[in-house]
Each structure stands twice: as structure tokens, then as C-alpha cells.
Amino acid sequence: MDTGKAFALKFISGKYQGGELPLSPGKEVRIGRSSELEIVLVEEMVSRKHARLFTDEDGPVLSDLGSTNGTFVNGERVSETRLKEGDRFLIGTSIFKVVTMDPGSIPLDQSEIRERLEEVAAAKPRSGGAMNGRIDEVSIPDLLQLFQASKKSGVLRLTDGSREAMVHLRKGRIVFAEIVGKEHVDPLRSIYRIIAWTTGDFELAPAEEREFPAELEESTEAILMEGSRRLDELRLHALPPSGDRIVFVEPLEPLLRDLTPDELDVLQLVVNQGELDAILDHSTVGDLETAAHLASLIERGYARAL
């Protein structure tokens, strides 16, 4: 831990979402259901005295106080650990993030902590979901890892402008994924696309009583690892942003006979669909293969982005 820094807790989701709480050296912040504590979370999954955060000259240390449902840091259940900038931890339905702050901030006593947090809670809009927040504050892979570790069930609803998606969880395992308006896309391809979202809102709603056409068999860990690999590979292709037009180049100088059958199929989709997501949706090969063919077609002058 770097010395000379001052730290704060940023509330990513839960009752105090959007608020920040300075962490004063030499003082502790206790979290739980008891009204005697500094951060009061009245939730079924939170123990009366759930966790303790103590800050020394090297930064904050988080300790679980023998809670029933556990304290999770970056997707791992912990008993005690030192936190660093950017770490996220989950207690009940509240996600906390460690951030740096102005070292000159005035330390808060217990009553001031409660007063500040209650002001945040009073100003926060009420939501029907048990947990909600912003994807740009906590990434979808981080969320899914936290939910997997804490064995949460429900529907992770994601919205970003006109885009909407749902990830169905059962005791932390991803059982199905769907993008609204793209129900024809299989759930595995859908979850890999969803993982790549970096903006928008999330909400963990209660589980739905429904049967799925085909449940995902892959573990959450396997999905997240493969999703990360695919995302890195897609970035290497440097394709135009989702929503941009991709058109056939006219007049065409390179020869069509130089293309493979799969490349010809993707070029046909460029002519018929003309937009990245639609091309991926209608391709008979996987997203990675389609992206590679599309990048090659653009590079070689068969297609271009508008």
C-alpha cells in the first residue's frame, strides 16, 4: 500500500449508492444490521455485526466479524484482508469501492458518518430492484464474479440506451443470457457480447419462474475467462463501433475470386445488413471468425465503415 494517500469508501450499489465516506486513520467503521454501527444495512443477508473496516497509516483493513453470509472482496470470500485503491467488496446487496481522496479532508466522528449516509439514502431514488448501479462503476465481469462467489440468484438486468439484456443466475451460476430483440442469438454468444458492455445501468431483480430453451453448461469462471479472451481478440481487430454503417466498396478494385467462401458470405452480409451487430447476428460462423473476416475485408478494400 502506498503511504501518503487518503482513502474513502464509494457506494456502488445498495442503500447508500452514489455516496462517499472518508476513511480516517486510526478509526474504525463497522458495518451490519445493528443500529449502533456506523454503516447500517438492514438486510436479510447482513449479520447484526457483519464487518469492520479499520484504517492505519498503510490504508484500510477489512475484517469479517463471523458473519453468516460472508464478506467478499473482488469475488473472493475473506476473513481479513488489506484493501487497496480500486478494490471492491460485497456485503448483502451493497457493493463498496475503495477510492483515493483529498488528504486534507476533515475526519468524521460516528454521528457525522451516520448523518452523511442518511442524507445520501434520503436523496437516492427508490428502486424496485434489490441491487442496482452503474456498469461504468463496476464492470459486468466483476459483478458476475461477485455474484458467483456469494451464490446469488436472480436476473441481472442491463440497460444502455436502446440496448437491454438479461443474465439469469441460479446460486451464482449463469444459466441463461439474452439480449432483447436478439432472441435468435444463442445464450453463449449473448453472454460473451454482454460481458463487453462498458456503459449503462444494472439491476439485480428477483429470479423468474420460467423454463429456458437450453441452459448454459459452462461454469461462470469458464465463461468469464473465455469472454475476456474474446474481448481482447475483438479489440485487436479494431472494428468500427457498434451502430456504425459498414458498406460494400464501389467501384470494387480487388477481385472477388480472391476471397474464401466464408469471406464471401460475410461480404454478402455487408451488402444485405450494413451494420456490425446485424452482420454478427446473421453470420453462420462465430463472432470472432466473423470479426476477423470483416476486418480483413475492410483492410483489403472490399468494405469500409461510414
Image: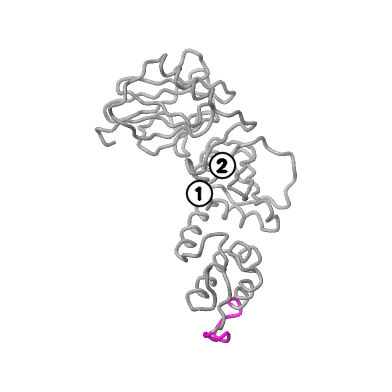
Query: Colour scheme of this structure image?
Result: one colour
Where residue 87 sits in the image (x, y, percent)?
Answer: 40, 37
Magenta-drawn segment? 253-263
Is there a contact, CB below 8 Å, between mark 1 and mark 2?
A: no
Query: Which residue extends farthest left?
Result: 4
- Relative to the observer, which residue lies in front, 263 or 76? 263
Give the residue displayed 29% in from the left and 25% down from the top.
56
Q: Is residue 258 magenta?
A: yes
Q: Is residue 262 above or below residue 275?
A: below
- Give the quadrant of the N terminus: top left
Q: Is residue 304 magenta?
A: no
Secondary structure of the residue carrying tag 1 is loop
Which amino acid type is shown beneath numbered disc 1?
Thr
Question: Would you say 121 lies left or right of 97 here?
Answer: right
Q: Which mark is residue 201?
A: 2
Where residue 205 sits in the image (x, y, percent)?
Answer: 64, 36
Q: Which mark is residue 198?
A: 1
Give the residue displayed 55% in from the left and 78% down from the top.
249
